[in-house]
Image (cartoon, rainbow, N blue to C red):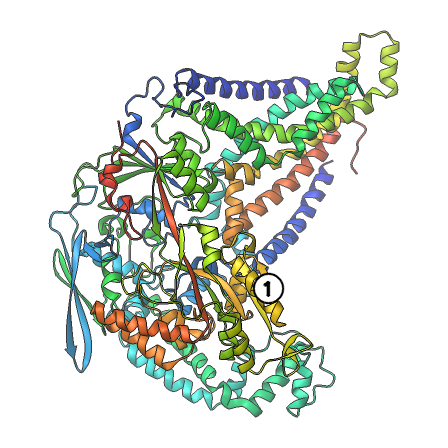
Amino acid sequence: MRQYIIRRILISVLVLLGVSFLIYGMLRIMPSDFVDQLTAGNPKITSEQKEALKEAYGLNTGILEGYVNWLGDALHGDFGTSFTYRKPVTEVLFSSKLWVSFTLSAIAFVIELIIAIPLGIIAARKQYSKTDYAIVFCALAGLSLPSFFFAAVLRRVFSIGLGWLPLSGMVTAKQNFTGLAHIADMGMHFILPIVVFVILGVGSWLRYVRTNMLEVLNADYVRTARAKGLSEHKVIYKHAFRNTLIPIVTFIGGSIPGLFSGAIITESIFSIDGIGKAAIDAVHTNDIPFLMAYMMFLAVLTILGTLISDVLYAVVDPRVRYN
Amino acid sequence: MKKSMKKLLALGLSGAMVLSLAACGSDDKGTTAAPGPSGDEPTTTAPGGDEKVGAGDTLVVGSTELNGVFTPFFYNSNYDANVIGAAIESICELDANNEMVPNLGEVTQEEVEEDGKTYVNYTIKLKDGIKFSDGEPMTIDDVIFTYKVYCDPTYDGIATFRNAVKIVGMNEYFYDTPDYEGKVKEAGEKAAADIEDEAKFKAFLKESNLDGWWDGELPGDLDGEGMTWADYLKGEGFDPTGIENDADAMLDMLVDCEFQNYRDGYVDAATAYFNQQYLDEFIKGNLEDGVDVKDISGITRVDDLTCVVKVEGVDISAARNLGLNSVVPEHIYGKDYVKGDLSGVKKLNDTPIGSGPFIFESFENNVVTFKRNENYWGGCPKVEYLKFQVVDEEQKKDSVLNGEIDITDPSASKEIVEELDALGANYSLVPFAGYGYIAISAKNVPDQKVREGLMHLMTRNQAIKTYYGDVAHVIERPMCPVLAEYPTDAEEYWGYDPDKAVECFKEAGYETVDGKLMKDGKQLTINVGIGSAATHPSTPVLTQMKEDMDKLGAVLNIQDMDFNLLSDAVDGDSLDMWVMAWGNSTDCDLRQIFGSEYTKAGGSNRTWVQDPEIDALMEEVVNTLDLEKRKELVAKELDMIMSWATYMPVYQRSDMLLYSDAVNMDSIPETSTFYSYLNELEKVELNH
């Protein structure tokens, strides 16, 4: 096992190198750059100043040279300064932005599981019944909703119509809340975004649980359990569900990195200062140092995530052996 | 395993519950006084415990984005600039009519002649008794410090101060070379010598990819009709057999070819290149051996509140460039500053400190919080807290109507104006400091008559009226109409007239063959680029044009492009025609847009207007201090630019400021392009 993990980590380093080069190359190939964008439409900027700025931002090099520079600095722990925020990218990346996004996604994630697991089990137990159809229909409907549309509907009803919840933002700027009141205020602002996350995300989990449960329910040992005369409750929750957990746990392990990536659309429309919004802004402004750090961070997490889920697989399922 | 799983679940659950409970709690205590379905504004009161400040004491301004770069030196978004303005003020400001008026101090000027050269001495005098928010008095040293930061050799922000004002001694300071003129001369001499050196000349050709001609692509297409690099070389008497697919060898042979046959054509470019290399060599790195030039010689400190800045030549925008600068406290921003190291200044990027009406407190959760500066020299601000909150463009209107935000700037459209009028909401519409235009490249469409024909096919009124209603209007000259110099009586120059267009095309030598407008066997084909065509106000102009050109047997290719691609294409001179807009045009200096020298790569004159007469006029305009005289010159200059048939000014749109019911409208000043509540933040009041 240890050998397996070490080998995987070594391969991961190579993968990361390749990924970083690909991302850097693609970012540099994008038409126009940060300086062009900043100076577009401004007749007062001279070409000399533009050139000087490009040099200052390291945009006057070739792609390969730029990449080698970036890699050299990155290996020394220096990921550069964000063009937009004018701060070291590591500071921007690991700021409150990341934790705001993570908190939102994590809460939504937990709620999704809480809803999806029981409903998935019920749907599987009563396959092809009206309950099953109703649950699957709702899951699919949520899955198919565009987030901006669903958010607009929620807002129309709960903010503009009923006036229960704030329209957007993270705090009520009109007030100067502190302590608990401040946390409560933030909570109010997060309700709608979390509802959007949950409704849109719960469907895929639900279908996953249902499918796995169905598979297990048809297994021989479940029939044996029933034949032994065990109560249905015991059969479902002790024998069937525990086996369903195996794929679910590995799937959850693999999903953890996704919690850090932020949600571009939802964060934008609710004006939440999260990492997803920052990332899409960076794409628009060609903030290369920030994008590089952000994507490399996600790449590392993804690789770690798959590694963890593979290891978890071996932990929860004794039959799995890596050599 | 089972237990930890449960624990995890329980933890998540309880977390979610705490959150939702807490949320309910705040609801119970009454953030809302249950607004009825009639659409009553929810009246907000602080929930228990924290009633220190009532809602009436906080003014909330909505911003599309906040990057947190709150320093006058390095910000790059207007929303950040607004935040900075609450804490940091400038020496002078613009009034509603775009005139510069005193604020922290005043700028006066005096022309002097020295050694046959004209200089202008600008005297900057601060008001007595102004203090920064930390209680320290403001002195002229703070002003000089601010100038020096903009002129620092390592300055990497987008402010144009250093190049915009020709302060005496600026180059010596910037390059840290006491004998700047001498170095320039030496570089020139060395460059002239290098030109005669064959090896160096060839090295230049190779290094510069034949002055940008060689694109490294094989086989290449030089004339748009399939002429390859190899064909070209054969035509010049070289034999590229065997190296058709070897880019390096091909470039080497091309270098030989160009050197042998067209050396003279490259001399100018080569001289500039060598010159720059020597300059870089002489001038760069001068700081590494210590600071040689400590001060800008043209700036003289007179007393604690006064300095004189000596500027070369007469330039109408110099006073503005000097006077509209922010003043930051040197004892804070300059604490660790030495020339060539701005890291100390950058440390204060996220905390603006100055003499303004508000004192910066924090930037968190997408909200910037300011508290009022009770000792503000212009009187204690009316509201206790000022906040800037990020709000998505789409939510601006609803946020104001909902009372979450007090003032913001939704993009003005016909629809929003109608809706706000119906609701009786307060808003101001002010002309945007810029304009939209359709440009034709005189480089790619060299025939003046063809360009004139195209101009006669543009019909603007209907398109702009339909799109904008009263929120924008058609303009007739390529200059921002809010400027005092704009010729308000200018009439339509070309005018929509398909018959005249046909005449023009005929005069250009085009004839109708088989229903096609042809010349030398080629159909008249124009490629035009436009960004986001689906929602662009100028799209109908192009579609009408396309229809008319179809009828005439000509082709208009409308290319809907991403803005980045469009600006790349424009910069690379690859389009015949394009649709874009200028912003930030607050003075009548048009040299960079229409000056001959700005046709070089990276310059802003992408329509390739090259006319010595226009150049001279534009130069005269910026050297003419008398407004009436300047107006005349500008009118003449603009007519001449129009006569080139490269620029069709289309529209000037308006910006909107929307105010919530909470804002006391009597405390909002008369708003124009140059002046708004942001200039008088201390006076803004809220209804109680």
Vertical position of residue A306 compared to residue A199: above or below: below
Determine if residue A89 is in view: yes
Q: Nearer the viewer, residue A29 or B680?
A: B680
Mark 1 packing: few (<14 Cα in 10 Å), some, or many (20+)?
Answer: some
Determine if residue B208 is in view: no
Q: Nearer the viewer, residue B450 or B659?
A: B450
Vertical position of residue A194 compared to residue A97: above or below: above
- Residue B12: horizontal and vertical position, in percent? 57, 22
- Residue A250: horizontal and vertical position, in percent? 71, 31
Identity, as a three-letter code, of the amino acid under mark 1: Glu
- Residue B91: horizontal and vertical position, in percent? 21, 54
* Quarter occupied by the C terminus of chain A: top right
* Quarter occupied by the N terminus of chain A: top right
Instruction: Report whether A42 appears left or right of B305.
Output: right
Chain of the residue under label 1: B
Q: Nearer the viewer, residue B154 or A121?
A: A121
Residue to which mark 1 is pinned: B547
**Residue B47 sits in which quadrant?**
top left
